[in-house]
Image: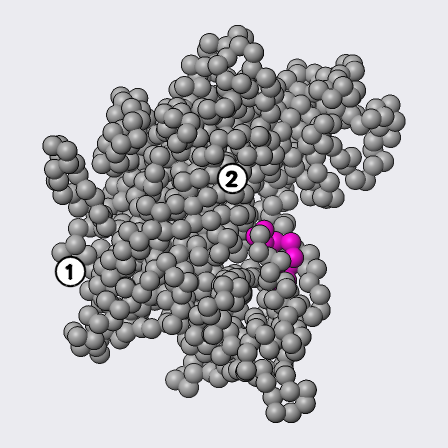
Amino acid sequence: MDGGVGLGGETMKDSGAKEFMVIHLDSKKSFDSGTSGSNHSAGRAAQVPYMDYKNTLTSWEMESVVAICDTFLPPVEVPPDGADEATARFFRSCASKAGTPQLIGGLISNGVEHPRTWQLRVALWFLSTRIGSLALCGWRCLSPCFPFVWRFAELPIKTREEIVRSWQLSFISLLRLFFKSFKLMTMLVFFTQVDHMNENLTWKAIGYSGPDPDFKAQFPRAMASKGHKSSEKWEDDEHQHGRSKEEREDEAFDEEEELFGPLYRGLIDVQDSRERVADTLRCFGFRTAVHLPQFPQFYSQHHNRFSVPLSSSLSRPCLTIKCDAVVVGSGSGGGVVAGMLARAGYKVLVLEKGQYRARSNLSLLEGPSMEQMYLGSGLLTTYDMSAVILAGSTVGGGSAINWAASIQTPQHVMKEWCEDHNLQLFGSSLYKEALNEVCQRMEVQSEVKEDGFNNAVLRKGCEELGYPVSNIPRNSPADHSCGWCCLGCKDGRKKGTSETWLVDLVKSGHGAILPGCNAIKVLTEKNVTGLKKRRATGVAFEFAYSSSGSKQVCIVESKVTVVACGAICTPALLKRSGLKNPNIGRNLHLHPVTMGWGYFPDTSMKSYEGGIMTAMSSPLSAKANSVNGGDKCKFEGAMIQTPALHPGMFAGLTPWVDGRDFKTRMCGFSKTAHVFALARDKGSGTVHSTTHISYQMKEADVEVLSKGLEKVLRIIAAAGAEEIGTHHCKGRKLNVKKASCHEFEKFVKEESRRAVKDFPRPIWSAHQMGSCRMGNDPKESAVDQMGETWEVEGLYVADASLLPSALGVNPMVTIQAIAYCSAESVIHLLKRMKP
C-alpha cells in the first residue's frame, strides 16, 4: 500500500453476498497537493494527440476513403490572378497528402459512435468493387474497354466529382447519408488537423491565425519547474523576506489556480491508484472504502508487480464513496445544484464525463478542443444526419463552450408554461428570485464595447432596414471580445459554472469533482416508507485507465441523486437505470438553425475575431388576440443572431459543388460573415440513446426558418455585402453589387423558400431541451415541477431536459434558474432526513 495510509481491514459483503477485503483509510491524513490529481490531469490532457483512434479499416475500405477525400479536396489549378505562395500551396494540396484519410479511417473505426456507421463501411467496401461501384455510381463507371466497369478509385477526378455531387441529391437515403457524413468528416478534419508546430497548411491561405494570438499556453511541465524553483527559494529567502513557508505555499497555490483555473484544488484524478484516490477523498471529508480483488493477501504483497490495473465490475466495484448528494454533470444545471448544496453544508460529489479545460490547459485549437470538450467530438448528429448537434462535454458543460448569451426566460414563455402547462413554479416568487440570483452570480450585463465582424454586420443591416436590434445580455464584461470562447475561455472572464457555482463548491470545503467519470447507472432500492416504489441510493460510474484501457467501476452511495447530464445524456442514463416512464427521452427540442452568409472583400475585420454574440434581432412581435374572452399574446418569427465559425465548422457548412469552387470559397473565410435564424420549434424528437437521436420539424417550423432566412439575407445585403448566399447544396450565390432589384428579390425569395426540412440544407443545433420535461401528470411528463422523477424517490433531474417546451432564446439562464429551484427542493429534503 501507499505509505502513510491507515489500514483497518475487515470483510464486507455486497448485495450479491460476495466478499471483499475493505481498507478503511485514515481521514486525518494531511492533504497533499501532489496527489490531488489536478496537475496530473492537466499534464496528461496536454499530451493527448488529436484523433488518436486506431484505424481498423481494411485496405479495400481505405482505398475508397482516400478516393472520396481527394474528390472533396483534390489538387486544382492555382488561380491566375496573382495568388500568393500560401494560396498556391493550398490549391495544389489534396486531402491524402495531408494524411486526412488515415485520420478519418480512425474516426470511422473507433471515434464516431453512430448507429449507421456500419452502413458507411458497407458502402466503402462496395465502392472498392466493380459491381458495387456500378450499383452506387451508375453509368459513369462504365467503360468501352475491358473490364468494362471501373472501380470508384480508378475514375478520373472530374467523373468522381459528378458522382459525389449526384449523391447529395439522390432519392436513395443511404447515398445522401454517405455524402453528408464524408463531407462533414473530411472538411472538419482537413481544416483542423495540425502539425508538430500546431499549424495547418491552409490557415495562411484562408486568413486564419489559429489559436488566439494573445493567448500563450503555459504547459504543466513549466509550472512544475516553476514550483520546484519556488520551493528552493522559499528555503533560501524565508528569513530575508519575513514570510513563512506556509504563506509562500499558499501563494504558489494561487499561482497554480491562475495557470490551471479556479477549480484546481477541487479536482480528483481517478487515474491515480485507488488507494490514493480514496485517501484524497478522505481529505475532502468523504467516507470511502477500497475493495481489493478476490485474493487480498496476494494483492497486498504483490500489487506493485501488476503492470495493468485489475479490472472491476458493478458487482465487484473497486471503490465506494459515501456523501449527502451526488450530482452527475457539471453544466448549467448540475453546477448550480452542486454549488448550492455545498454552500448549505452538505457533502457533494460531482461526476463529470469530460475533463477540466481552463486557462493554460486550453489549446484553443478547433479540432483538439472539439474532441476534448464537445459531446461526440462535435460530430454528434441525428439518426438521418438531418441535424448536427453541438453539446458540451467538459467540466462546466455547455457553459464552458457556449457563446456567453445570458437571456432571461421571456415573459410570454413563463406565462405559457404557467397557464397552458399548469406549472405554477414559473409564476412564483421563487423563480423570480432564481432568475435574479443566477444573473447576479454570473455577472450578466448588456453593455458592449465593440462588436465583432459578424455582429457589426447584423447590427448595421438591421439599422439600415429598420429592423429591431438590441444588445445581448452576456455573462462576460463589456470589453470581452474573444472569438475563441466556443473552445473554452482563456482568462475566465466568461462566467460559466466552472467560474462561479463550481468555485462555490470548491471553496466551501464540502465538495469535490471527479472528471473523466461516466455514470453507468442510478442505483435504487425498494422504498418501504415513501409513496414511490423505489428510492435512489446513489450512482455507479466507470472510468478507464489511460495507460492500459482497463475499465474500473466505482459506487457512490448518497442520500440524494441529481442527474444533470444534458438533454441528450440524461434520458439515456435514466433508461439504463430501469426507469420506465414513457416520456423519458421524448419531446426533444433542438432550436433548429439555418444560416445565410455574405462576403465583404474590403473589410479589415476578421470573421472569427471579436465577441461571438453581442447583437440580436428579436423575433417577438406581440399581437393581442381574443381567445375565449381573454387576451393572449401570440409571438412569431425567428431569433436572428450570429454564430462562432472557425475553419472546420465553416468548411462543414459551406456548400460543395466541386473541388475548385470549394477552395475558392474557403479563401474568403476570414471575410465572410454569417448570420443565422433560430426557430422555437414545435416539432420534436426522441433520444433513444446517446448516439441514436431522431428529430422531425413541423411545417410551422419550416415556415419560421424560411421567413427568418429571408430576413437574414436582406440584413446581410443591407450591411454592404458584395455576395450573399445560403448553405443549400447547389451553392447558389448572388453578386449584390451587380444585381438589379428584380434579380435580388427573386434570389432572396427563391433561396429562402427552398424546403428547409429537406436534405439539401444542413440544420444545426446548439440548444437541446425537453427530453425529460416537467409537469403535473406522469402520463405527460417525466418529472414533477421541482425535478423529482415520478418513479424514484430522491432522484432529481436538473438540466435542459426539464424544459416543458422549446424556449425560443438561449437557454443558459433558464436552465440555471430551474436548477436553483430544484436545489432548494433538495435542500429541504435533506433537512428532513435523519443525519
Kindly tell me whether residue 495 is visible in this rendering: no
Amino acid under disc 1: Glu
Q: How many marks?
A: 2
Instruction: Look at mark 1 in the image and give the residue it sits on.
Output: 464
Q: 239 or 218: nearer the eye?
A: 218
The magenta segment: 103-114
Quadrant location of the N terminus in the rendered image: top right
SS of the residue under disc 2? helix
Q: In the rendered image of this protein, does residue 568 appear above or below residue 501?
A: below
Q: In the rendered image of this protein, does residue 612 appear above or below residue 288?
A: below
Instruction: Look at mark 2 in the image and give the residue it sits on.
Output: 569
Question: Would you call the spot at circle 2 few (<14 residues within 10 Å), some (14-19), or many (20 or more)?
Answer: many
Mark 2 / mark 1, whichever is N-terminal: 1
Instruction: Give the main secondary structure, helix, strand or loop, of the magenta stretch.
Output: helix
Q: In the rendered image of this protein, does residue 638 appear above or below residue 181?
A: above
Question: Would you call the spot at circle 1 few (<14 residues within 10 Å), some (14-19), or many (20 or more)?
Answer: few
Tag of residue 621: none
Q: 146 or 537: nearer the eye?
A: 146
| Residue extending furthest toward the top | 834
Closer to the camera: disc 2 or disc 1? 2
Q: Is residue 421 left or right of residue 205?
A: left
Kindly tell me whether residue 782 is visible in this rendering: yes
**Residue 172, percent from left and from top:** 50, 67
At a point 27% along the width and 22% down the height, the residue shown is 428
At a point 40% along the width and 54% down the height, the residue shown is 764
Quadrant location of the C terminus in the rendered image: top right
Q: Is residue 794 left or right of residue 221?
A: left
Amino acid under disc 2: Cys
Query: Does the magenta segment cover residue 367?
Result: no
**Residue 30, percent from left and from top:** 65, 20
Q: Please say if the residues under marks 2 and 1 sit with CB atoms less than 8 Å apart.
A: no
